[in-house]
């Protein structure tokens, strides 16, 4: 064999073996890094909104409008009804004093009907209670409770909680019948944290002395904002002479003024929103509490809470339990269930669905340490044989 042929054979063997070794050493971190460009810095994979109007009766029209305005905004920014829980007395649209039946407006010109044709109220009328609200947050609902009345969040959920109504120092009234205290709210958030029911929470409240309602929160990763400080009232923005009552509150009005300029691709942050707070416009002193929040507010996108995300999550591979089908023949012929919208289905969580599909569709999974290690041994063995053969052939010529 000619020396040039030996060199060509040797070089080709090294290239093949090296390529094989590199291809099988790709690990999960590399794949996750590929998707990281599209993943929110907050680390959340789903968004939820809990919108609560604690008032009833015609003269509280503006509180209904506050809640429906926020409902319209989060839907516009991508949060589906399946991920929105709305608690509303719902006694305004069809009130006998409403000269515009089946409508609710938040402006004097009545340019936009907030009630519209596609509004889903999950808790209405006398269902809007302190007990139901706390059970909703903590997940301690009756087993017969339908999905539409459950907050099906996990440790990768960002939650917007918006409340509006009449309040005072460290309390918020529910339909003039009962109150929720700042201690109750802080305890509910602590239970949510212990049960891993959220990644981050934005708590926003529009009521008199609103800032006192987040004074007893001690759970991490919660940012809170309110419309007025201790001993201050929160005021309505304007009324409609034809309707005869105020149609929206000042704090909600100016928050919506910012949010109306936001789309799903917006880079506006919470700091941008909070910087717009102006006592001269609100006629009260809004507050922000961020000492429990881990991220700088100028890095927190408004869409992290008011919008929706669709991220890909890579889960650890798991071996299919063959013994289960062996002991239960009924499972052998069962067909897999494919879920079109993981966030809208309670039969299987998003993490479980992704993991199950990944297990069924891969026989060799990139990043599997056992498989990758085996193929590394094969690659290096091929490389060693190639080098040894080349050296033997070269020595025979000598």
Image: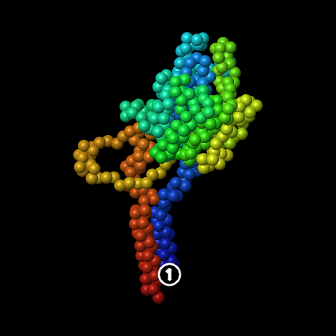
Disc 1 is placed on an element classified as helix
- The quarter of the rendered structure image containing the N terminus is bottom left
Residue at 41% x, 44% y is: 353
Residue at 69% x, 24% y is: 237
What colouring method underlies this structural image? rainbow
In the rendered image, the vertical position of residue 198 relative to residue 13, given as above or below? above
Relative placement, left or right, of 67 versus 377 is right
As drawn, the residue found furthest toward the right would be 280
Count of number-bearing discs: 1
In the rendered image, the vertical position of residue 130 relative to residue 56, given as above or below? below
Would residue 76 be seen by someone viewing this image from the given angle? no
Decide which of 11, 397 is in the foreground and name it: 11
In the rendered image, the vertical position of residue 176 relative to residue 262, given as above or below? above
Would residue 128 be seen by someone viewing this image from the given angle? yes
The answer to which image quadrant residue 250 occupies is: top right
Instruction: Give the image location of residue 221, x and y in percent.
Output: 57, 46
- Give the class, few, some or many, for how many residues have Cα within 10 Å of label 1's Cα (few <14, many ≥20): few
Decide which of 138, 262 is in the foreground and name it: 138
Decide which of 365, 124 is in the foreground and name it: 124
Instruction: Give the image location of residue 43, x and y in percent.
Output: 55, 48
Please name the residue that numbered disc 1 is placed on. Answer: 3
The answer to which image quadrant residue 95 occupies is: top right
Residue at 67% x, 46% y is: 298
Instruction: Give the image location of residue 181, x and y in percent.
Output: 55, 34
Instruction: Give the image location of residue 155, x and y in percent.
Output: 49, 46
Residue at 50% x, 45% y is: 193
């Amino acid at each position: 064999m000619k020396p040039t042929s030996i060199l060509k054979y040797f070089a080709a063997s090294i290239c093949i073996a090296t390529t094989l070794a590199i291809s099988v050493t790709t690990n999960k971190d590399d794949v996750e890094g590929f998707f990281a460009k599209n993943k929110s810095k907050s680390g959340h994979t789903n968004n939820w909104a809990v919108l609560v109007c604690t008032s009833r009766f015609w003269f509280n029209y503006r509180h209904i409008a506050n809640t429906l305005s926020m409902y319209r905004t989060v839907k516009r920014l991508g949060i589906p009804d399946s991920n929105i829980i709305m608690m509303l007395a719902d006694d305004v649209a069809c009130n006998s004093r409403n000269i515009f039946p089946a409508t609710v407006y938040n402006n004097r010109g009545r340019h936009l009907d907030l009630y519209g044709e596609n509004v889903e109220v999950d808790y209405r009328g006398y269902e809007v209670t302190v007990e139901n609200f706390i059970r909703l947050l903590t997940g301690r609902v009756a087993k017969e409770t339908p999905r539409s009345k459950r907050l099906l969040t996990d440790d990768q959920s960002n939650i917007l909680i918006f409340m509006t109504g009449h309040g005072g120092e460290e309390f918020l009234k529910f339909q003039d019948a009962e109150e929720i205290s700042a201690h109750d709210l802080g305890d509910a958030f602590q239970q949510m944290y212990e049960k891993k029911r959220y990644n981050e929470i934005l708590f926003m409240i529009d009521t008199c002395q609103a800032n006192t309602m987040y004074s007893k929160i001690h759970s991490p990763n919660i940012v809170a904002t309110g419309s007025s400080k201790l001993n201050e009232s929160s005021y309505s923005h304007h009324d409609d002479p034809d309707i005869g009552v105020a149609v929206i509150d000042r704090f909600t009005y100016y928050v919506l003024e910012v949010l109306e300029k936001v789309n799903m691709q917006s880079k506006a942050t919470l700091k941008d929103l909070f910087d717009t707070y102006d006592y001269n416009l609100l006629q009260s002193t809004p507050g922000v509490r961020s000492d429990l929040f881990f991220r700088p507010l100028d890095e927190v996108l408004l869409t992290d809470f008011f919008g929706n995300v669709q991220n890909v999550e890579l889960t650890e591979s798991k071996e299919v339990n063959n013994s289960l089908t062996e002991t239960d023949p009924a499972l052998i012929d069962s067909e897999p269930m494919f879920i079109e919208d993981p966030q809208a289905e309670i039969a299987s969580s998003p993490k479980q669905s992704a993991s199950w599909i990944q297990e069924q569709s891969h026989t060799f999974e990139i990043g599997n340490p056992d498989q990758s290690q085996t193929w590394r041994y094969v690659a290096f063995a091929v490389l060693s044989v190639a080098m040894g053969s080349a050296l033997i052939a070269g020595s025979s010529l000598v």
